[in-house]
Structure formats: structure tokens, C-alpha cells
Amino acid sequence: MLELQGVTKRFGDTVAVDNVSLACRRGEMVGIIGRSGAGKSTLLRMINRLSEPDAGKILWESREVSRLRGDDLRRWRRRCAMIFQQFNLCPRLDVVTNVLVGVVAERPLGPTLFKIFPAADRARAVLELDALDMAHAALQRAGTLSGGQQQRVAIARAMLQDPDVVLADEPVASLDPVNAEVVMEALQRICHERNVPVLVNLHSLEIARTYCTRVIAMAKGAVVFDGPPQGLTPAVLERVYGRRAGRTLEPLPAVEAA
Amino acid sequence: MTAAVEVFEQERRRVLRRRRAEALIGLLAFSALLALAFQRSEFFSADIGGDPLGRIGEFLARMVPDLKAEALLEDRQARGSLAWWYYDLPLWLRTGWQTVEMALIATTAGAAAACFAGFACARNLMPLAPVRFVVRRTLELIRTLPDLIVALILVAAFGVGPLAGVITLALSTFGSLGKLFAEVNEEVDPRPLEALEASGAGLARKIRYGVLPQVLPNYASYALLRLEGNVAAAAALGIVGAGGIGVELQRAITYTEFDTYLAILLLIVAMIFLIDIGSEQIRHRLIGLGAKR
Amino acid sequence: MTPADMDQALELSPRAVRPSWRDRVLRGLIGALALAALIAMAVDVGVTPTALAAGSGKLATFLRAMIPPNAGGELVRIVRALGETFAMAFAGTVLAAVAALPLGVFGAKSVVPQPLLHFGFRRVLDMFRGVPALVWALIFVAAFGLGPFGGVLALAIADVPGLAKLYAEAIENCDEKPLEGLRSAGAAPPVVLRYGLLPQVAPLMASQTLFFLESNFRNAAVLGIVGAGGIGFELEERIRIFAFDEVAFIVLLYVVCVAVLDTISQRLRARLA
Ligand SMILES: Nc1ncnc2c1ncn2[C@@H]1O[C@H](COP(=O)(O)OP(=O)(O)OP(=O)(O)O)[C@@H](O)[C@H]1O
Ligand SMILES: [Mg+2]
């Protein structure tokens, strides 16, 4: 179980994440919604420890991960796969190497610096790519792929991380509807097959309703709603997004974030 | 193993082989060139007097002036004072100023000529294709000539002195600015030109009222950039006898006064630096002006 | 001309379309002053029409003597000297790149985040960026004797500040996203640099170094003038004895070689992009 206890993050005067406490069980697909600047990205980044919380604890299976340092921290990051809106691949490296990044934390430093990996790792990487219909591009430079293809490579990398937790920060915000569906289905599959919690930041309520079993809404750094997607009534949405949302439920007003 | 993995491994071996071959060829070619370059230039085989590190140390020791803390602020007669180090400062400042003058004159003359050339080879302003062709080729030819070689020939013709340097710099300024100005002209906004044409203006008026107001800030900014380069180049030109502070550098070497060389070098660096800062300020203001226009 | 056209012209350059009298007088005054100052400077350094006329005759004779260009029976020697010049340029650029690499790394804001240190370091680089290679060559030849050693050293030292600055900028301007992606997967810092940073900056740095190499091919000829070896020495010798047909031959050959090398280097740079 992933637990957050009173997690807070400040940037100067702005409180990006304000005393957030929550718990996610294995197999839960959690959508996090909220206006731009609500603190969604900051929350996920703190779980992966790309960003340090100012207060509070983050626990995985009762172990405090917000305290880890050095190798332990890297091992946690490896187990806590993160998927980004802009994919964050290395554009000049080939696809398979980008996927193999998923195991670098566990492999000896010397050979990895020369991009040498065991054949078994390569085989796994190709199989993960193949599952996402990307094996044909394995030796192409990642930068030459389309956005949807790059995001699939990023998911293959996350798979190679053998994740205990999957975090996805607006994974479909720069993709067309078809690719968005492919990516969201892949995340859903991971959630079920591996039985891990998946936390997805989303700007589309429709996607949240379709794929998530639970929705957390944030406003100004705090959690203002936590429950099943059916609970997203106009009144709740007004609290999350402000006045306009109450009147025009769909489509979402928060596309301004893109 | 599944088919996908097998296909991948095969493809990977092929790609890897090709990449390794390419890398090997590249590495070999580079090493060969490097070895050849160092052999030809005798960099490591040069006989600089047995013990090279000692030689470099000795050189640095001769270049750094023998300043004494207690005598630092005394006059020229006191060994180890600043005034003793910079013993000919008035002359150096005068020749330094001469270098700046050379750069200013050359930049102005070159830029003025480049203005005409820039109009004469801009596709949107000069309708006669042969004229454009000739001007363009001329500018190209001038740009390919190495400055200091031109200077050498001009010194032979005009004698030792700043004149040869000024002509050299003016020529190369003309060559490079002519091309840049033409590019600026070709990117001019055509709307005011059309407005003027509609009112029956001729080519001269079109340029005066439609083009110049748009391009002048860009021209000035390029010319200033070139001025910065010309001050440094003018300092070097003195070394081949083309006037300015470079002559003093050459003289310091003739008398093997390495500490004097350093003194003048620092003076040149300061001079270039001041010009750069001043010109940068003006350029930033010009860019603001161009943006507002 | 319609009123709309007029408005447009006015908006694009109001003062050009309707200058006020005060503006015109002021501008004329400033122009006249600048012109006077320029003429005074020209007189001061001896750039006068008479001086110009005095030398033009000689220059014309020189130019006439250049045709037809002629190797003077010393083709082998010339080619050898030319090779030496290009070898100096190559060696100097490589040395400069090697020296500039650590300076560039430590000059990058992202590596040394101390602003004062960073600012001071950059300023020093900026100051010495302007010193031409010839100025360095003059003293190195005096210190280390005639020959290409001083020339190589001069080219290298003249290039270091400029290259270091470009390298530092390449590192500063790199895209952070890949690095973050690597960190998020638990990659150790050396792996982050090797996978995320190196593939981004190495091609850029190589391309900038090639650019400097091109410029050094162009400039290395002059080093011979102060005795630093190569074609410049041959040129100076022939200018001194007024053998202008041979001068023309050498310059032509040099310019053609530079053009060829430029093309090769540009091809390489295009491949790096
Ligand atoms: N590195 C940072 N430095 C300073 N302020 C930051 C930083 N990162 C985030 N913030 C601030 O923290 C707040 C929350 O930002 P965050 O990126 O988490 O929002 P978000 O909900 O992900 O928004 P979006 O939907 O636009 O991605 C914002 O006010 C933002 O300006
Ligand atoms: Mg965000």
C-alpha cells in the first residue's frame, strides 16, 4: 500500500502541495484531477522523489521512502516508474536503449556506461516493446518517433522497471484521441495484470471516468475530493475548477493547461 | 525465444556491425590526420631547447613583470613600480587610440560602401540581374581573401603606416557587411514599399522612405558588431607594419621586452573590452528600437 | 495613395513619413559633427586622398604583375608549406578543444551554480576572446624560436576562450527532460550524464569545433608572417621581392584549398545535426 501522511511542499510563498494524506491499495487506478497549478505534478514528483517534501511522510508497504538516500533511493525510484507528458526519453539514443534505462539502476555501472546489457534484458525490452506494437522501431532513434510512439516507448521502459507503483503525469495530454486510448489501456492493463497502484494526472474528466476506479481532486494543493468517479457531481466540480465548471460540465475548462 | 526477439537480435547485430565499422573508420581517419598534423607542424618534435617545460616556465617568468609591492606606486625611475612597467604609457595610449581610429574609419567606409552594394544585390530592390550577379561575386571574392595577406601587399604598396591597415579593414568590412546588408534588405516588409509605389514613388524615394527606416537599426547593429572585430583586427595589423598599437607589440619583441609585451597586451585587451561593452549597450538599444519601430 | 496606405506607412515609420523640423535640424547637426570627427581622425592617422593616390599607382603595378599567376618553379615547396599551414590549423584546433573542454564544463552555470564565480569566469573568457592569434604568435615565436610550434600554440590559445564559452553554453542550454526521465528510473549520476547529457552536447560541441577549424584554416596563413611557419612565410618572402605572380599563385591555391576543406567540414557538420 502506498501511503501519504501530511505531505507538504512549498516553493517560496506558494504552497504547491498542502498537507495531503491518502492511501492507495494495489490494483487501484487513481485519476488525479485539478486546475493547472493545483499541485498534481508536484505530488507525483514527490512520490518518485524527484522533488523533496518539506513536511510529511511517504510510505510504501509501511516503509518510509521519503527518507531514502543513495542506492536505496535509486532502487525505490526504479520500483516507482514515472511517465511524463513530454515522454522524457533521450531523443538521440535508440528506442531499445531508452527502454533498457528501466534496468540501469540494478546493473553494474561499468558496462552500462558503454551501453552494454545482458541479452536477457534486451530480450525483455523487445518483448515489452512488442506488446505495445513498437518492436519494429527498436533500433530507431527515439527522437524520430511520433508523440504517441514515444509515449509507448516510455511505457515499455516503465514496464522494465518492474514497478511497484506507476505514476503518470498527464501521459495523454499531448496525444491524439486514438493514441490516448492506447496509452490509457496500457496503463489499465499494468494496473490489473501486475496488481500495482497507478496514479494518473489527468485533464480530461471523460478519460478519468472511463478508466479510473477512483478519482482524487486537488485544488490549491489540497485534496478536495476523493472517491469513485460517480461522485463527481456538478457541485464537486465547481469546488475543483471554479464557477465555470458547474455550468459547462463537458468539455472541460482546464484545457488551458496545455 | 520468440520471433520478435530473434528478428531484433539479427537486426541489432547488423546495425552494430555497421556502427562499429563507421566508428573505427572515423577514429582511424581522425588519428591519422592528427598524427600527420602534429608531425607536419612539428609540435612535439620541435626543438625548443631541450627541456620544454622549463622553457615555458622561463618564458612565463620573463613575461611577468618584476613588480615590487613596496615600490608599486612610485615613478618610472623606481624599478618594480607600475609606472616603470608601463614606462611608455602615453605613447601606447596614443597608438592605441590610433588603432581605434583605424577601426572607426575602416568600419564607416566599409559600411557606407556596403550600403550601396547591399542595395545593388538585393533581389527585391535591384531589378537588373547582371548587376546583382557582379556585385555578389565581387563581395564573395573579397571575403575569401585572407585579411593579413591583403595587408601585407598593401603595406608594400602604400608604405608602412595606418593607411594600408585602414584599406584592408575597409575592404573586408565591405565584403562581409555587403552580404549581411543585402540579406537584411531582402527581408524587408513589402507593405510600405507597395504603399509608396501606389503613390507613384520612384526607386530612390522607395528606398529612402520605405526601406531605410526599416533596415537602419539592423545595419547599425551589424556595423557595430563588425567594429568590435575590427578593433581587434587593427591591433593585429600593426604587427605587419600597418600602424596602430600593433607596431609597439612588434617593437617590444624586437627588443625582447616580454614584460612590456604583456603590458601592451593587457592594454589591448582592456581596449577591446571597453569597445565591446560600449557597442553592446548601443546594440541592445538599437534592437529595442527595431522592435518598437 | 489611399488614406489607409498613408496610415500604414505612418505607423511603420512615423518619423520618416512626417519628420518635424526640429528633428531634421538636429539630425543634420549630429551628422555634420560625426563627419567632421571622422575626417579629423582620418587626417590624424594619415588616411588622405593624396596618400591614397600616391600608393595606388604602385598597387596597380603590383596587380598587373600578378597576371598570370606563376608557381616560379617551386610548386613542391609551396605545397609543402601549405600542408604545414593546414597541419598547424588542425593541431591548434585539437589542442584548443582539449583545453577548452574542462574550462567549458566548469564555466557552465548548471555545473558551477555560484553566480559570482560564474560571472567572473565568463568575463575573463570574454576579455581574451578578442585577442587575435597573430598577437600570440608574435610572442611565442620570440620565446620558442622560429617554426610552427609557436604558431600551433598561438592558434590553440586564441581559440580556447571562444570554444570554452560555446561549450559552456551547450551544456547550459541542454534539455533537462531526458535527464529527469533517467533520474526517475533510478539511474546513477554518471549514467544520467552518459545517457542524457553526452548525446545532447557532444554533437553540438563537435560541430562548434569544426566551425573553429574552418576559421583556423582561413587564418593560419598569417602566422607565417611572424615566422611561425607555413605558407605565410613564403608569401612574405615573395612580397618583399615583388614576385607578385608567385604571390597570386599561392593566394589562389590557398583560397581553393580553404574552399575544399570548408565544404568537407560543412558536410561533417550537417551529418552531426
Ligand atoms: N520548481 C518549481 N519552482 C517554483 N514553483 C514551482 C515549481 N514547481 C511547481 N511550482 C509551483 O507549484 C504549484 C503547483 O505546480 P504543479 O506543477 O504541481 O501544478 P499542476 O497541478 O501539475 O499543474 P498543471 O496542470 O499545469 O500541470 C504552481 O503554483 C507552480 O507554480
Ligand atoms: Mg503538471
Image: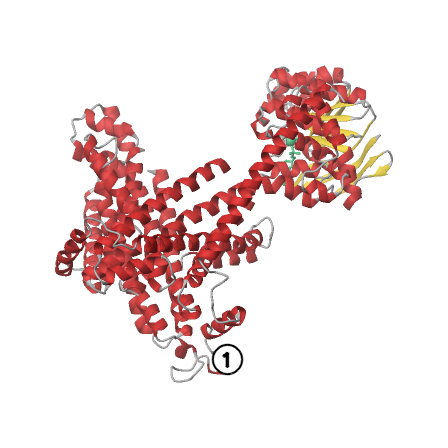
Task: Answer above or below: position of C226 versus A28.
Answer: below
Q: Is residue A12 visible?
A: no
Q: Left or right? Give the position of B165 relative to A24.
A: left
**Front-lying residue, C264 or A199:** C264
**Front-lying residue, A117 or C169:** A117
Residue at the location (54% across, 69% down)?
B53
Residue at the location (17% across, 35% down)?
B204
**Front-lying residue, B248 or B266:** B248
Q: Left or right? Give the position of C250 relative to C88.
A: left
Residue at the location (34% across, 75% down)?
B88
Neighbour tally class for label 1: few under 14, some 14-19, many 20 plus, Cα within 10 Å? few
Q: Is residue B185 visible?
A: yes
Q: Chain of mark 1?
A: B
* Residue B118 image point, x, y percent: 25, 39
Would you identify the image quadrant in which residue A211 lies? top right
- SS label for mark 1: helix
* Residue A45 image point, x, y percent: 70, 36
* Residue C186 image point, x, y percent: 73, 39
**Front-lying residue, C154 or A210:** C154
Ligand 1 in which quarter: top right
Residue that mark 1 sits on:
B69
